[in-house]
Amino acid sequence: MSEEERPIRLLAEDSSDWARAHPGYFFEMARPRVQELRDQLLLGARTLSQGMVSEHSVNGWCIVASTDDWFSRGAATQANQALFHKLQAFPELGQNCSRPEFVVYTFARDVVTRGPDGTSVVKGSVVQAESAEIWAAIQSDAWQRIVAFRELDTSGRDAASS
């Protein structure tokens, strides 16, 4: 069979499953680390935001916050949770770069975001009563966009199975 006659094979693999199987595409030592997730998210927010971007830690949570909603900027402007669920190019950062929200979603255990369209638990189980400090930080009026996450997801699960 010649090259021209070969059927095109489509991969049906979920992009999060693929990313977990190939962490070397996203992390320096080919191992996910919370600090690298935070740094990627911080760099992404600083690249797109026209306002002040800040990072905070609250009881094991990493928080990246901006006075501007960086989700509404760049080539991949999306609704609140859409940036988390699909591997998307990030040309503003460079060739072969991907949006950090997807990387955070794929490798973190719990992810919460707040923006102009409201507050959402994107992944995991975040009970308000058990996490009062993080909910207080997320609800701060000082920020237009906040993404908070904690710990690495060692189960390989996504939001649908949590």
Image: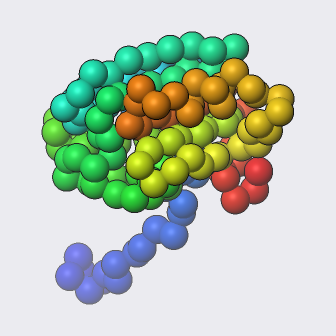
| Res 90 seen here | yes
Q: How far from the left and from the top, in percent, is residue 90?
A: 25, 43
Quadrant the N terminus occupies: bottom left
Say which residue appears at 26% left-offset and 86% top-offset.
5
| Res 29 seen here | no
Say which residue appears at 59% left-offset and 49% top-offset.
120
**Residue at the farthest right position:** 130
Say which residue appears at 33% left-offset and 52% top-offset.
88
Q: How far from the left and from the top, in percent, is residue 153?
A: 68, 34
Which quadrant would residue 43 be assigned to in this image?
Answer: top left
Which quadrant would residue 115 be assigned to in this image?
Answer: top left
Instruction: Relative to 101, say whether 4 is above or below.
Output: below
Say which residue appears at 58% left-offset and 24% top-offset.
137
Q: How far from the left and from the top, in percent, is residue 60?
A: 67, 16
Instruction: Relative to 72, say whether 67 is above or below.
Output: above
Q: How many marks?
A: 0
Which quadrant would residue 4 be assigned to in this image?
Answer: bottom left
Q: How far from the left and from the top, in percent, is residue 72?
A: 28, 50
Viewer-proximal residue, 32 or 59? 59
**Residue at the farthest front position:** 141
Colouring used for the render = rainbow
